[in-house]
Image: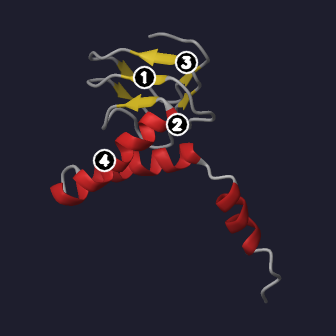
Amino acid sequence: MNTGNDKIPFLKNLFYPNYTLKYLFLLRKCEYYQSHNPIIFNYYYYRFWRMGRKLNISINLGVFGYGLVIPHYGTIVVGGGNKIGNYCVLHTSTCITAGSKNIGDAFYVSTGAKI
């Protein structure tokens, strides 16, 4: 039985889109197609790069495990070569420099942290 409430999330997303969720979606698409199909990878990587410039977020591919959460968009920089576990939370104005850091699961980075 359709109550008509299924249109509310569609309209909410239409007028107030969740850009951080789109960024994470594009991040995972790029990570998948990087080793599967280079043509589709280039398409998604271009979209990922543009969305990152729009949101001021720069995350290299293959750094985070599953369950990454970005509550707010704004200056987030994560360099390549790092391996960070599952269920991580990144807040704004954070920087994790490039290197070979291995960080475990449930990593919480608060606003203004530099690692």
Q: Looking at the picture, which amino acid does disc 1 mark?
A: Val
Q: Is residue 74 left or right of residue 84?
A: right
Q: Position of residue 34 (x, y in %)?
A: 22, 49
Cα distance, mark 3 to mark 1? 8 Å
Q: Residue furthest bottom?
A: 1
Q: Looking at the picture, which amino acid does disc 4 mark?
A: Tyr
Cα distance, mark 3 to mark 4? 24 Å
Q: Looking at the picture, which amino acid does disc 2 mark?
A: Tyr
Mark closer to the observer (3, 4): 4
Look at the numbered disc 3 and give the secondary structure of its residue.
loop
Residue under numbered circle 3:
93
Crowding near the residue tagged with mark 1, few <14, some 14–19, many ≥20 C-alpha atoms within 10 Å: many
Residue at x 43% of width, y 34% of height: 53
Mark closer to the observer (3, 2): 3
Q: Is residue 112 above or below residue 30?
A: above
Residue at x 51% of width, y 35% of height: 55
Cα distance, mark 4 to mark 1? 18 Å
Residue under numbered circle 2:
87
Crowding near the residue tagged with mark 3, few <14, some 14–19, many ≥20 C-alpha atoms within 10 Å: some
Residue at x 48% of width, y 10% of height: 114
Do residues under tags 3 and 4 come within 8 Å of each other at their CB atoms?
Answer: no
Crowding near the residue tagged with mark 2, few <14, some 14–19, many ≥20 C-alpha atoms within 10 Å: some
Q: Nearer the viewer, residue 50 or 72?
A: 50
Residue under numbered circle 4:
46
Quarter occupied by the N terminus: bottom right
Q: Position of residue 80 (x, y in %)?
A: 28, 25
Mark closer to the observer (1, 2): 1
Q: Is residue 88 above or below residue 51?
A: above
Q: Which of disc 4 and disc 3 is earlier in sequence? A: 4
Quarter occupied by the C terminus: top left
Residue under numbered circle 1:
77
Look at the numbered disc 1 and give the secondary structure of its residue.
strand
